[in-house]
Amino acid sequence: MPNAPVNTASGQPDVAALARLTPEGLAACLARELRDATPHDSATPQRDEAVAIFRRYLARYQADIRARFEKHELKGAASAKQIAAFTDVLVRGIVDLALRATATPGTVGEGTQENRSGSNLVVAATGGYGRGLLAPFSDIDLLFLTDEGNAHDAHRLVEYVLYFLWDLGLKVGHATRTITECIEEARKDTTVRTALLDARLLAGDGALFAMFEARYIVACVEAGAAGFIHDKRRERLERHRRFGDSPYLVEPNIKEGRGGLRDLQTLYWMCRNTFGTRHVTDLLAPDFIWMGILTEQEAARARRSWDFLWTVRLHLHYVAGRAEERLTFDMQPVIGARMGYTRHGRQNGVERFMRHYFLTAREVMRLTHVLEPAVLRQAQGPVAIAVKPDEAMREAGFTLIDGQILPERGISFDKEPLKMMQLLDWARMRRRPLHPLARHQLIRWERRAVELREDPEAARIFLDLLCGEAPQIETTGRRRREVAMPSDSEAQVMTSYEQHAPPGHAHWLHILNETGIFGRLIPDWARIVGQMQFDTYHVFTVDEHTIEAIRIMDEVASGRMADEIPVAYELVKGLHSRRALYMAVLLHDVAKGRGGDHSEIGSEIAAELCPKLGMSGEETETVSWLVLHHLLLSHTAFQRDIDDPKTILDVADIVQSPERLRLLLLLTIVDMRAVSSRVWNAWKATLLRELYVRVAEVLAGGLATTERDVRVRHAKEITAEILAEDGIPQPDIERFLELGYAGYWLSFDHETHKRHARLIRDADAREAPLTVEVLPLPARGVTEVTVYSIDVPGLFSKIAGALALAGASIVDARIHTMMHGMALDTFWIQDTVGSAYEETHRLTRLSSLIEQALSGQIDIKAEIAQAGFGHMPLRMRAIHVPPRVVIDNGASNTFTVIEINGRDRPGLLHDVTAAMSRENLQIASAHITTYGVRAVDVFYVKDLFGLKITDKKRLEEIRESLLACMKAAEAQAKALLDAKMSA
């Protein structure tokens, strides 16, 4: 069918518009070309020629829709509808061709397509395609519906259609069933029932399809909506667990993740099944507005969310060239740019784009909270026995429906915004879930919470929601009559809120955040809602990470994480500053994304905010201090030598108080654990615990860290006693005690000294030039590798290279040259998942690679160059990590501290330490930490004469040399990878 002429502003015809296909035009073009290609003595053209015709038009309409979409002429959902409409024409054309090709001789050309089908076959679209929406690389779901006696005869036609579609390169999901089989399968499988809800006639016998629709509607009514809704909710729960329970994951799945397209579709299916397939053709249909379920504003927001998610999905498909649904790091900047997001102030385009996505996901969750309960009540009806509100609750202006709390009639959040906070307070005290209508009103009137910023009662309730003690069923004083025990009949329907532990503080913070009240009440919070950090270290957005940290804090305080984090459980007992700790957890990242040091800015925000929330001056000072120093312990434990006395004294000087030290360690632990369960491990727990113990010892006035000689003498005495008890001859003991410098004796415990003594004694007796010992330490989450060898330049670098080839990550190292010139180097390593090497064959391979590397049997540099970035997924390489070298001469009295920042890759440590060797630096210890793809390697070094480096010119030369080495090695690895990919 020809298109109407289209003129440009100059009056000339728009050639692109004239050439643009419509579904009707496609049908006409296909019919004409197929007719012209059909020989006079045949019903159909040659198969290869027919496939070529269809393939040409398939490519044309796909390219046309993509071009219009990328020019922003079509939005996401509109493009998906266009793809589905063109696919309809394509499928109908193929079915018509199949009918001609498989028709009985003599019947070809007789009557219409329906007549040729023999009134016994239907081709229907199902699933998303049945709804008339199709992403560029999605499956085409088809149902071939036959009558009871024609299944065998339809086989040839079904086979023809499927093979034709596959020849076109399309992915097809298909089923061939009778009406009875459809209904039976739908009864057994909710997925089938869901797909058939959207069945849409494409070609074939209209009467047969009408019969299917009628019988299917009856079957759905007889089955009831309640069971279907229950199944869909369970399915959604499992899906969320599989793809991430939070909508704020920094690499979300936009289709299956929480707050994604599938959640909107689930609502649609629930509504369609409950209200009838003939009445619900669209989730956002006006029917819902008339029925009072959604307001006009809510429906408009839902439509925007739907279209935004579809737009993102189509961009994902087009950029990836496949059915990609995960918004990975490498895709985010590309799609953000395609959608027009650019830098604005301190926020770059990708951060603005992802914030829009997360706010959209929150909108989908809001819609779920509003719409789903209304549908569920329609399906199930009111509960048989409902808990009644008591007098105290009614006096406060609240009531219960179906055991859920909501405002009484006549209570207006618009006129009394404090009632919003009081509603949450009552829900918390009574352990009652919010009624959907209550949540609906909170969302609708959240903007009125601005008036509560200076309200002391709102502040009190907020602090109770944040860190208040768990409410009891029976209390005394002010709330005695508010929590009267329920009657016997009421007890029968007590919700899980009262049968189990009450919701934690994170539950209430989630409600405040999802409704929008949180950001209105505390403006600084609004700035981090949906704020992502474009790195691979953080798993959540800033606001979700913070609420997760509060949840972890609750778990620690209750003892439920005692096995995973025993040190935190011990610390939390008898804590005096509970409110200050919870508030510090809430505010520790509140200044992220503002530029500058977020700890310093956050500390200032805390000093201003805490008094407004009713906290005392002492609490305010504690919160502000904790936020300012919340990275102190992790930075020190993982990036500094805690065996260096100055390190411990510096921390003790900042902390000054045992209570503050406890608070700071708890804040550090919950902050790390809330980033991701993978970030916290036994090795980090060990380092933090050791740092805590040593600083606590100084604060308690114990043995001063400056009394170095006393500590060395004490370590030697204990070691001598242990060795003597083991039967080591006295001359051997004395020789071992003379071998180590003071730093060696302060770096290890007595058991390690004992092992070293035996290793050195045995190796010297054998005159072995190299001894390698590996010891798994699963309780600490590491494997200890000890190398006893003749000390040669570049020894550290070679060992680091060998460990890199084995796939091991070095997390800590101690390098010691003994008095007789032998090196005793100790490395603590982990595998790729952050655990210790324990299997015998892996331990043997570690030893073998180190021996081969030190004996020159393998070319470490060449092997590492081959590894390059190959281990790193493409999505990770999208994160830019500029190399950086920082030299700190103030962190230690005896060593120069060099901090290396760069992209984590195989051999980074080897390259850096090789450069240090060329600069004649002696490495005493190394402390390795990774944050996603960013590595932070810290080295304590001296010059060739064993002295701290103080000359500024020399320090700058070292810095430039290390920086040049990192840039060259990274460029070489990247070039090698690019060559591999292009090949």
Image (spheres, rainbow, N blue to C red):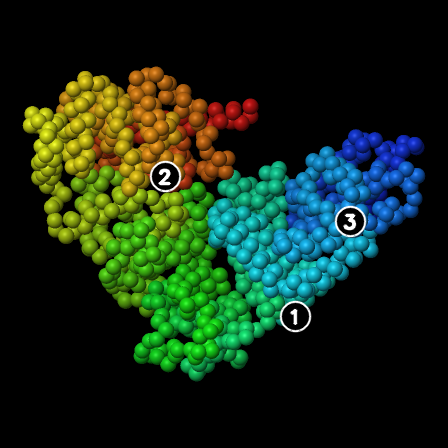
User: How would you rate the neighbour count of disc 2 (Cα within 10 Å): few for under 14, some for 14-19, many for 20 or more?
Assistant: some
Q: Amino acid at mark 1?
A: Met
Q: Secondary structure at mark 3?
A: strand
Pinpoint residue 86: horizontal percent, then vertical percent.
Answer: 75, 45
Judged left or right of residue 718, residue 395 is right
Discs 3/1, front: 3
Q: How many neighbours does mark 3 have within 10 angstroms: few (below 14), some (14-19), or many (20 or more)?
A: many
Secondary element at image label 1: loop
Residue 330 image position (x, y, % from top left): 52, 39
Q: Which residue is mark 1?
A: 291
Residue 16 is at least partly visible in this image: no
State left or right for residue 683 relative to residue 22: left
**Quadrant including the N terminus:** top right
The amino acid type found where label 3 is placed reads Thr
Distance, label 3 to label 1, CA atoms, is 38 Å
Q: Where residue 361 is drawn, which disc sits there?
A: none
**Residue 559 visible, this angle:** yes
What residue is shown with label 2? 834
What residue sits right under mark 3 in the picture?
A: 146
Q: Quadrant of the C terminus?
A: top right
In the displayed orientation, state which residue is furthest to the left.
730
For image coordinates 25% across by 59% down, the residue present is 573
Please tell me which residue lies in front, 406 or 624. Answer: 406
On screen, 360 above or below 685? Answer: below
Mark 2 or mark 3: whose residue is earlier in sequence: 3
